Image (tube, coloured by chain):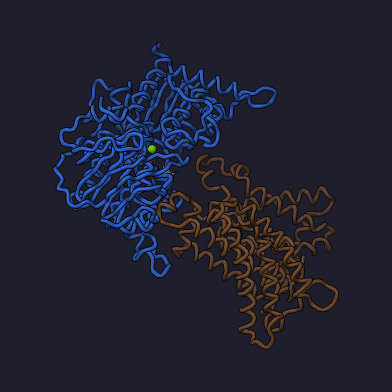
Amino acid sequence: MRWLKPVAVPLIAVGLALGIGAIILALSGANPIEAYSALIDGSLSSQKTIGRTLEKATPLIMGGLAVAFAFRAGLFNIGGQGQLVIGGIFAAAVGFGFEGLPWIIHAPLALAVGALAGAAWGSIAGVLKATRGAHEVITTIMLNFVALNLTDWLASNPWKDEGILSRTPAVEESAVIPQWGALPTGFLVAVAASIGCWYLLERTTLGFEIRSVGLNGDAARYAGISVKRIVVATMAISGFLAGAGGAIETQGVIGRYEPGFNAGLGFNGITIALLARNNPIGVIPAALLIGAMEAGGSMMQFNADVSPEITDIIEALMLLFVATPIVVRWFFSRQDVAEVSITSGWGSS
Amino acid sequence: MSVAAPPALEVLGVTKRFGDVLANEDVDFRVERGRVHALLGENGAGKSTLVNIIFGLYRADSGEVRRNGEVVHLNGPRDAIDSRIGMVHQHFQLVPVLTVAENVVLGNEPTRRGVVDLDEAASVVRALAERFGLEIDPWARVEDLPIGLQQRVEILRALFREVDILILDEPTAVLTPQETTHLLGVLRGLADTGVAVVFITHKLREVMAVADDITVMRRGKVVGSAVPAETDEASLASMMVGRSVELSLERTPASPGDKVLTIVDLVVNDDRRSQSLNGINLDVRAGEVVGVAGVEGNGQRELVEAITGLRGVVSGSITLEGVEIAGMSPRQISTMGVSHIPEDREKFGLIGAHTVADNMVLNRYHQPPYSRHGIRSPGAVEDNAERLVAEFDVRPSNIGAMVATLSGGNKQKVVAAREFSHEAKVMVAAQPTRGIDIGNIEFIHRRLIEYRDAGMAILLVSAELDEVLGLADRVAVIYGGQIVAIESADGIDRDRVGRLMLSGTDN
Ligand SMILES: Nc1ncnc2c1ncn2[C@@H]1O[C@H](COP(=O)(O)OP(=O)(O)OP(=O)(O)O)[C@@H](O)[C@H]1O
Ligand SMILES: [Mg+2]
């Protein structure tokens, strides 16, 4: 049962949240079984709905990875949203700005530029922390506002499409990230990114340095690691992931950059990372779960006449339970107090 | 006390298993009120586990704990405090940014109109401190206090809750000899007021000085008990380790070579930016041990951190075989051949959530064979760890275990093993045997001498005057950020060194 231990807390949290969600549904006069089957209907019943779940899950994976990765260095990147929109608009700019490039070059190029733009944006907070000691929570929140206004301005001035709407022109066909049947290619990119993050953290010296800084900064310094360098590198990688998420959204889903299309995507990353307990592989099922709830939410409204906000409530409950080890401790009342507190904090993996 | 009165604390048949490790096996342990009970045993014997079970931090797999004859089920420190059990941990559990008074009353604050009454707290703490001879400034911030005073805060915190049982897990490991003497007096006084004191230590001299009862554990089991009047250090030692132990090291003369490490007019600031080293001059030759003796807080820590690159240098120079290393990064200095056993193993020496294997390469992880082209080689890391774990007898020998799960002494062995495994020219060893049992101290001391004889220059910083005098070829006394005396250890006068440590002069 040893394998069960790391997943126990999220599983119990999800179960509890769904249970309480059912009670809330019943209290509000709906039939919980009907509602939940509509949820499944809308997210998992056909190739088309599964495809939609995967599509929803993709930016969630990237945003979740961004938060989880930064957290492994002890950094709390709240700036996923800003990094994501920056990545989205730069990918769009490359996507509509070049004509006649072959797909094999154009699509990866736009994705790479979006990701790098996100990396640059993320590393601003890293540099501020390393050189000025500015706390990344504060700077990334402020940079979110800057990024939102900057992208709004770009989309309504230099990079504006013709017509009245403030949005960029559609990207060239050659910059689109295609579907493989029901399977969005972007999802595969996100899964590859998860595996890449796992490999980076667990198998490379850089990953060892990042984890060491996150676990004990003093000992990391003793070990000869430059903590400042790791802070900047981690924020850059974190921004890279979020930026790639924005690029995939632009190139694979929306087809252009439109202000507001992805409001909240970056913030959902925090939920995902928490559910995944900062494990890059765990981000995939966590994002699929949330993605399925988002994909199925509208079906629930349609079939069971339940407002889609119920999925937000359930998500919030999951978060609450994951973040509150005391609830889970009821289920492990035979366990050592000291052990529970070692393994259940935010940040342990 | 009437014969029929049940003991203050009784542990019956307690067994505790962590995975494959049987940390406590059918342990019986009995503590009477008004007595100081010393708990002895090798590193990893299960002492901390036992007291953590008593305090409710761990749950025994089987067996029971009785207070005054009644079975208690403790679910964490709250319950323990409710049953009037207090504990001072191996690692302090204080809030660094709060004041002494706030830390003491935390969780039980005196209030006035719903607000914490800090003046009241301070006066309560002052009264408590006076009563038990633990003088301290209630308004001082805990993070500004030296470790010996932090420990006082821990003790006051327990006493504030009016405990009848006070457990101290290796309280003297971090204390200077003077502080230790004082603490032992305090414990004696507490016992005289009727408190049952449980006291874990590796230092047999303390046991002989203060204990009324002695229980010895080995490999999870209680292997014997004794009273000081009917035993001696040598037989306690062999009861602990299961063989006879050489309590003092055979000194062999050194044959020093060239100067390897040279420190000239070194000035260094402490964390609060006031000067803590005021122009230190010191050199260490190849093949000799220079011991730095001093009361903690006289600049030892800053000296060690400056040499190893963890702390900036204000002025002066530190050279390694003629090359200036002051101002270099820790990595550069370590690569040039300076090994470092840090004083605070939890803070600097180890990453608790990394495995034993990863900690064994903590400052070499980036070099071949442990990694190539930025990719780590787990095989090489594991081979290295297997070798060192066997050589230094780290228990349990599972190299995949998190270091945080090791016992205190075994953690120290991991640090020592790692630092001894480098090809180094200089070894800076700060409290290298802190928390290590006598059998392993003997082993580490032998290693230090072996490396010395192989030509390493060793700078030994220790709060144990006996360790300094026993190992060093030359002794430097540090006082107020200066070296006030440096002389050959041959025929050195222990009392004179003691006076120099305390006042900087020998009269
Ligand atoms: N939380 C834990 N998880 C796994 N193993 C543990 C844990 N705590 C203790 N152990 C193991 O139990 C055994 C006993 O450890 P304990 O800390 O009680 O020893 P100790 O007698 O206090 O030693 P020391 O003198 O070195 O402090 C050790 O082998 C240790 O590795
Ligand atoms: Mg211990």
Q: Quadrant of ligand 2?
A: top left
At a point 18% along the width and 38% down the height, the residue shown is: B488
Q: Is residue A70 above or below residue B442?
A: below
- x and y percent of residue A61 in the render? 63, 64
Chain in brown in the render: A
User: Quadrant of residue B38 in the image?
Assistant: top left
User: Quadrant of residue B278 in the image?
Assistant: top left
Quick one: B325 or B223, which is closer to the camera? B325
Quick one: B289 or B242, which is closer to the camera? B289
Q: Is residue A244 above or below residue B7?
A: below
Quick one: B300 or B161, which is closer to the camera? B300
**Quadrant in which the C terminus of chain B is drawn:** top left
- x and y percent of residue B414 in the render? 34, 49
**Residue B71 appearing in the image:** no
At a point 78% along the width and 75% down the height, the residue shown is: A160
**Residue B384 appearing in the image:** yes
Chain in blue in the render: B
Q: Is residue B138 above or below residue A59?
A: above
